[in-house]
Image (spheres, rainbow, N blue to C red):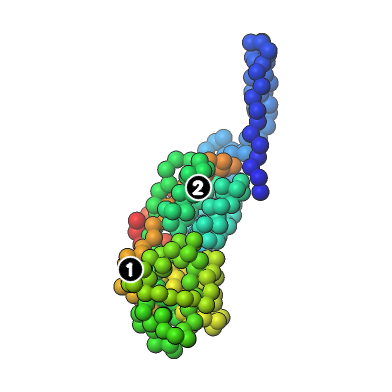
Amino acid sequence: MTRTARRTRRPLRSAVGAAAALLALSACSSGSDSSATTGSSGSGKLSGEVTVFAAASLKESFTTLGERFEKEHPGTKVTFSFGGSDSLAASITGGAPADVFASASPKTMKIVTDAGDASGTPATFVRNQLEIATLPGNPGKISSLEDLTEAGRKVVLCDKEVPCGAAAQKALDASKLTLTPVSYEQDVKAALTKVELKEADAAVVYKTDVRAAGDKVEGVEFPESADAVNDYPIALLKDARNAEAAKAFIALVRSAEGQKVLSGAGFLKP
């Protein structure tokens, strides 16, 4: 997608022309419904669609918060795009329309802020820690990160450019371990699915994803994960089409109510 072209300002030929243009603009604004652009009815009531780009690991929590937001603000709709944070950041800087970006790492958020596409300073709202996801019952008897390096073990990792992949690599480096996975996946959900479908013996994912999968997988904690905890920042985007509603959604995420939902999903407090 491409960004909407910015309107070029042309010099007016006279002060009278300028005044006339301003009067015309004012009349046009008063005679139209501004809520179509801002999402606000003018009375403080929120309305319209909020588009949120969020890390795949936030899917369950944010879906719940989106439903609560819509219930608390009738007339609003929260639309999500979940995926690898690096891909989402690239889409935003490439012009994809979005109001909010919630990333799984400061590094991927920096892609957006460096491009000047964020409004204000991103705020860390949760943290997340890695865990090994194995098949139910842990038939491979995996008990450590080192066990994943055994010959013949089919292990899946997130791509190194994705926050969960970068964190896994950091944990491996700290342990001085070398692991050759059978595949690198585009996001944490894709990595977990490989285990759920029994296409892999194990995957290094987030604790929150293991919890969300229920009895489809079994989680194995490993101490090295403490050296690779990811901070999750959230930001309003500069070209947000519904800035007021976007700010309200961010406020919900950071509120006690939002933190309760996120903590319940296994996220750590910032």
Q: Position of residue 106 (x, y in %)?
A: 42, 53
Q: Residue at x 57, y 49 (%)?
A: 92
Name which residue lies at 41% across and 64% down.
Answer: 167
Q: Is residue 135 at all visible to an observer of this figure?
A: no
Tell me where residue 141 appears, x and y as whole percent. Answer: 39, 87
Query: Residue 261: which quarter of the image?
Result: bottom left
User: How much space separates mark 1 and mark 2, taking CA atoms?
Assistant: 28 Å
- Could you say whether the residue bearing mark 1 is in a helix, strand or loop? helix
The numbered mark at residue 211 is: none
Residue 189: x %, y % from top left: 52, 69
Answer yes or no: is residue 174 visible.
Answer: yes
In the image, residue 200 sits, relative to residue 62, either above or below, namely below
Q: Residues within 10 Å of mark 1 (few under 14, many from 20)?
A: few
Foreground of the two, 79 or 168: 168
At label 2, which amino acid type do we have? Val
Residue 34 placed where, x, y %? Answer: 63, 35
Identify the image quadrant of the C terminus.
bottom left
Please tell me whether mark 2 sits on a helix, a strand or a loop: helix
Left or right of residue 48, residue 117 in this image: left
Q: How many marks?
A: 2
Decide which of 203, 182 is in the foreground and name it. 182
Q: Amino acid at mark 1?
A: Ala
The residue indicated by pointer 1 is: 174
Give the residue number, with chain letter if any, for mark 2: 112
Q: Earlier in the sequence, mark 1 or mark 2?
A: 2
Pair 1/2: label in front: 1
Residue drawn 49% across the image and 49% down it: 111
For the point 41% across and 80% down, the residue is 149
Res 133 → quadrant: bottom left
